[in-house]
Image (cartoon, grey):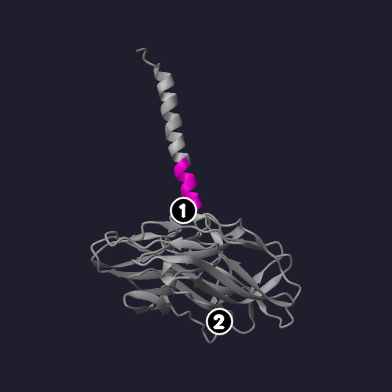
Amino acid sequence: MKQLPIAVLITITLLIISAFIYIYVTSSTDQNTRAVKSEKISIPKDNDFEIVFETESVDLPAKPPWVQYGEKSFYPKMNYFVADEDIWITEITPIVEGAPAEVLHHGTIYFQNDYQKYCNDSHQIFYSSSKEMIPVSTPKWYGYFIPKGTTLKSDMHWIHFRNDTEKSFQNVKYKVIAKATKDNTKNLKSANIFWLNIECSEINEYIFPVPPNEIFTTSLKEPYVATEDFEMAALFSHVHDYGKNMKFKINGEAIWTFYPVIENEIIKTIPPYYPQKPIKVKKSDVLDIEVTYENPTENVSEGMGMFAALIYKE
């Protein structure tokens, strides 16, 4: 029998490998993004209205008892919003339908064409939540300003479901409802969100390793030096399981410490901080966050340390 030339064998092998990759990718895509295409959210004619961001529904299989985390991750599509005119947002409420909030690893909506001041290679985040489902309301006289032409969206791996329980769930959705107004007759101060993250990598989902069997404290790789004066009207934080606290510091002094509310070893919420008077930040002030974890397991766990502030500049 005549032997095939090596070049032909290599070509056949590559074709077979390509076929397997195609089958794997398309089947994974079918599982993780079965929905209908992402659709643009339209602004209604009413002066006061709601923007409802909503993912497609996904089915989450139970976690096998022999693995630490859920075997499958799901990244569903979500509709998107384009501001046809200036708007001010006063409330944001996250919802998980069809399952406990714990299945939401993270759900993030970002500004398509804007980037963070500290993690300047990372998109500016409009809103992000995890299982603690923290609603946001702007303090009196402030509005979360979204200028005309802004696109708010969530794609790639910005919405992440992972079921770490041994029960399956069907038709699970993540929603974010934002209350907004078009006509700023109340003369709301146009505020924005300022972020500090322990880990800046979007690709790694802002996750860093937490070593096992120890109390572990970490801070920003480099503190942030303010480039202008501004005031902070509200403070928010996010940590993962085994997170004990987060300190926000200005010039080395702890301004506020966040403590997660924990039930059955699960973080239920991390209360925001609404100071009675805005916190003044001066140009050249040094801002830092310090996060402490206590991982009692034998395994490295997934840590996260995200701080956000509603800020206003004159």
Instruction: Quadrant for the C terminus, please.
Output: bottom right
Label number found at residue 203: 1
Asked if 36 appears above or below 95 in the picture, the reply is above
Counting other residues with Cα less than 10 Å from the Cα at mark 1, is it few (<14), some (14-19), or many (20 or more)? few
Kindly identify which residue carries mark 2: 278
Q: Amino acid at mark 1?
A: Ile
User: Residue 137 location in percent, x, y?
Assistant: 57, 80
Q: Residue furthest bottom?
A: 276
| Residue 229 visible at all | no
User: Residue 21 location in percent, x, y?
Assistant: 45, 40
Label number found at residue 141: none
Which secondary structure type mostly characterizes the magenta part of the structure? helix
Counting other residues with Cα less than 10 Å from the Cα at mark 2, is it few (<14), some (14-19), or many (20 or more)? some
**Foreground label between 2 and 1:** 1
User: Residue 49 location in percent, x, y?
Assistant: 69, 76
Find the magenta span and give its range: 23-30
Q: Quadrant of residue 290?
A: bottom left
**Residue depicted at 51% across the width and 82% down the height:** 274
**Residue depicted at 59% across the width and 82% down the height:** 139
> Viewer-proximal residue, 224 or 245?
245
Earlier in the chain: of badge 2 and badge 1, it is 1
- What is the CA distance from the residue labelled 2 to the residue labelled 1? 34 Å
**Residue depicted at 41% across the width and 28% down the height:** 13
The residue tagged with tag 1: helix, strand or loop?
A: loop
